[in-house]
Image (cartoon, rainbow, N blue to C red):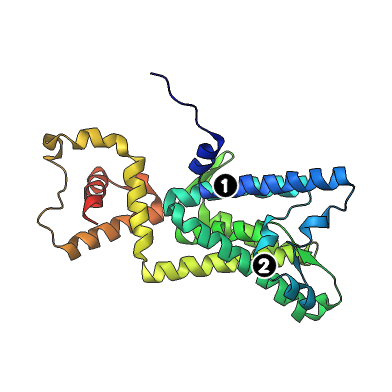
Amino acid sequence: MRTTPQSLTDKIKQLRYFEKLIALNVTLFVFNHLITFFAGLPRDFFFKYLELPKSLGAFLMQPWSMLTYAFVHYDFMHLFWNMLLLFFVGRLFVDYFGQRNFLPVYFLGAFSGGLFFWVSYNLFPVFLEVDSSLVGASAAIMAVLIYTCTYLPKTEVQLIFFRVPLAYIGIGFVLIDLVQLPQSNPGGHLAHLGGALLGFTLAYNLIKTTGSWYKLDLLKKMRAKHAKLHSVYKNEEAFRGAPRTNGMSKSEKQQKIDEILDKISQSGYDSLSKDEKDFLFRSGDDI
């Protein structure tokens, strides 16, 4: 049976949000460099209308730059490292929190980072005489990273030869920005800290309120990730010894689900027992 090749549009639609952001950033970078090179224009001919200026007058002329600066990269290595980090951080975030929650954290992080930069450069005397502007996706990426590290502090990820808890990674990134702040690129580090503060605040508030949208998305993700078990679950005999949700009240069932999801957030999915995995899978249709 012959299959119709997918069009480029179909392939783009199948990309996850963070992958689309990577594609957009790369496209803008290539477009800007090619057009300005062949037309003999300054590199900032187009991008200066997207980057976030320090000046109040300039900002009032382009208020959209509080977000659009996150799509501006002049240097290839700046773009490369940002997109590489966005790929790994975005994939980790989507695996745990789902697609639909990624963009709000990302763009709120960009806004928070931009605001942190702009207020600092117009408030602190050390920056008042400095003419500067902000570019790059780092603050938005930082928000996503710190959000994930705050909500899943004990979840370990592979870092070269070692498995490291996310809490240590988040703390490490923040410390690097604090140490380098007085040394070089203070505007960029201030934006990173603004994004980090936003990510931490969102995750901390979610922990306090135990937001249901996270738990629903996590449950769906866990069920999809382990869909290969579904063939076993089709056989009712396979459930003879599995924990059943029938006979439990709605509040009891929800409490049990909350306990399991809290365990996942602390130690990861693999820390669950077989009974807990079975219960979580079976409960998905009841939520």
* Relative height, residue 268 to residue 205 (above, below): above
Choose the circle earlier in sequence order: 2 or 1: 1
Q: Which residue is mark 2?
A: 64
| Residue depicted at x 68% and y 55% | 71
In the rendered image, the quadrant that contains the C terminus is bottom left
- What residue do we see at 12% from left, 37% from top? 236
Q: Nearer the viewer, residue 47 or 202?
A: 47
Above/below status of 132 relative to 215: below
Residue 20 — which label? 1
Label 2, label 1: how far apart the Cα atoms are: 20 Å
Residue 149 visible in the current orientation: no
Asked if the residue at tag 1 contacts the one at tag 2, i.e. Cβ–Cβ closer than 8 Å, the answer is: no
Q: Position of residue 285 (x, y in %)?
A: 23, 51
Most distant residue in the right direction: 40
- Residue for point 29% across, 60% down: 258
Closer to us: mark 2 or mark 1? 2
What crowding class fits label 1: few (fewer than 14 Cα within 10 Å), some (14-19), or many (20 or more)? Answer: some
Q: Position of residue 36 (x, y in %)?
A: 84, 48
Q: Report whether 99 appears left or right of 173.
A: left
The amino acid at mark 1 is Lys
Question: Within the image, what quadrant is residue 8 found in?
Answer: top right
Exactly how many numbered labels are in the figure? Answer: 2
